[in-house]
Structure formats: structure tokens, C-alpha cells
Image: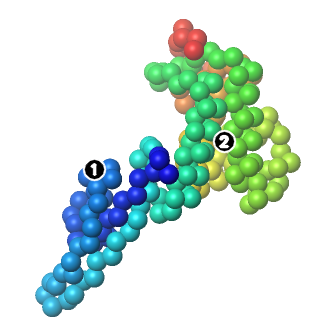
Amino acid sequence: MASHRAIVAPLQGRSGGWPKRSGEFLGEVPRNTHKGITMQTTTETVFIADDGRRFRSAFECQHYESQLREVNAVMSLVPPVEMPHGTYVLRDAETLRSVRRLLWAIVVREYGENYPQWKTWHADAVHPSSIVGRVLSDGTAVPLSRAWARLACFDFDLGREYQQPYFAVHPGEAVEQQNIHP
């Protein structure tokens, strides 16, 4: 696992929590006695993903990194742009719809067993602010959840990406258009 680093860190006995440096091995901490009470120290192996997120198993870490790469590849079709409040940028409407379809395919693959009805839904019929967004935000699919939340800023018909989801629902209130065409 070249992209994973295992850290064995004590759960007690060190103020400041996790190791300060990636890959730091803290080893065993001796038993401490405080006011006649013996405290036992336990060690734990932690797997760190490329973006710094920590996992207790190699499988979870590998799954997360795989999903992160896949979602980042999809979202690279619509590179992020810095936007002031109440603005939008023009995007190709078909590209926005493609991003939604590609993300929906990942959602169905990841959550289809728990939500079998999702397998019957078409991506274009699923609103980004629907129960799907809630399920993703409550789950462990962080990269997918973030990407899905960004979909709520898209107007798939007009080909716009708004600074926040409110303006996608109230497009007349987005007063300024940036002349940026990513």
C-alpha cells in the first residue's frame, strides 16, 4: 500500500492528540499511576489517506481514496471558480448534465444496495437537494457528498453554476454575472 501510511499512536498518555508528523511512530507508552489508579495505555493502527483523512482499516482507506479519485475525475469537467456572493458563471449545460449523470452512477453503485429504488431513478429526475443529498451528507462518502452538494448550485437548463444553492432556486436574485467561461 504505497499511498497509505500506518501510524501506531497511543490512545492515552499524550496531550495534543494525534502525531504531529505523518508517519510518526509513538510506540508503547508505559502504564501511568495517578493517585493510586493505574491507567492502561492502548495502541491503535491508523491508515492515513492521501488527503489526510484517517481510517482504522486499510480497506476503508483504499475505498475512500478510490472514490476520491473517481469523484475528482468527474468534477474536473467543471473546475471550481471563485465567485463573489450572488454571482454565477456560465457553463456548458450538457457538461453539467453529464456531471450529474456520472455522479449519479457512483451514488447508485455505492448506495444501491441500501436504497434499491434509486436503481430505477434516472439521473436527470433526481434533484440535488432531494433525500439523496441528505443520505450522502449523513454517510461516510465525503468526496461524493461534497460533489453532490455542489450540484445543487447548478442550473442544468441555463448552464449556470451559482455561488450558492439559493440562487439556483431563485435565479432572478443573482444580480451579477462574472464574465468567466471556464
Q: The disc labelled 1 sits on which kind of residue?
A: Arg
**Marks 1/2: CA distance?**
39 Å
Q: Which mark is residue 64?
A: none
Q: Is residue 17 above or below residue 161?
A: below
Q: Quadrant of residue 29?
A: bottom left
Q: In the displayed orientation, state which residue is furthest to the bottom.
A: 36
Q: As rendered, which of 122 and 37 lies closer to the eye?
A: 37
Q: In the displayed orientation, state which residue is furthest to the left.
A: 35
In the picture of the structure, the residue carrying the numbered disc 2 is 129
Residue 92 point in image, percent of width and height: 69, 17
Q: Residues within 10 Å of mark 1 (few under 14, many from 20)?
A: few
Is residue 150 in view?
Answer: no
Q: Secondary structure at mark 2?
A: loop
Q: Is residue 178 above or below residue 126?
A: above
- Give the residue at x 32% y 50%: 22
> Cβ–Cβ below 8 Å for labels 1 and 2?
no
- Give the residue at x 38% y 69%: 44
In the picture of the structure, the residue carrying the numbered disc 1 is 21
Camera-nearest label, 1 or 2:
1
Looking at the image, tell me whether mark 1 or mark 2 is earlier in sequence order.
1
Q: The disc labelled 2 sits on which kind of residue?
A: Ser
Is residue 99 in view?
Answer: yes
- Give the residue at x 41% y 61%: 46
Q: Residues within 10 Å of mark 2 (few under 14, many from 20)?
A: some
Q: Quadrant of residue 148?
A: top right
Quarter holding the C terminus?
top right
Q: Secondary structure at mark 1?
A: loop
Q: Is residue 9 above or below residue 65?
A: below
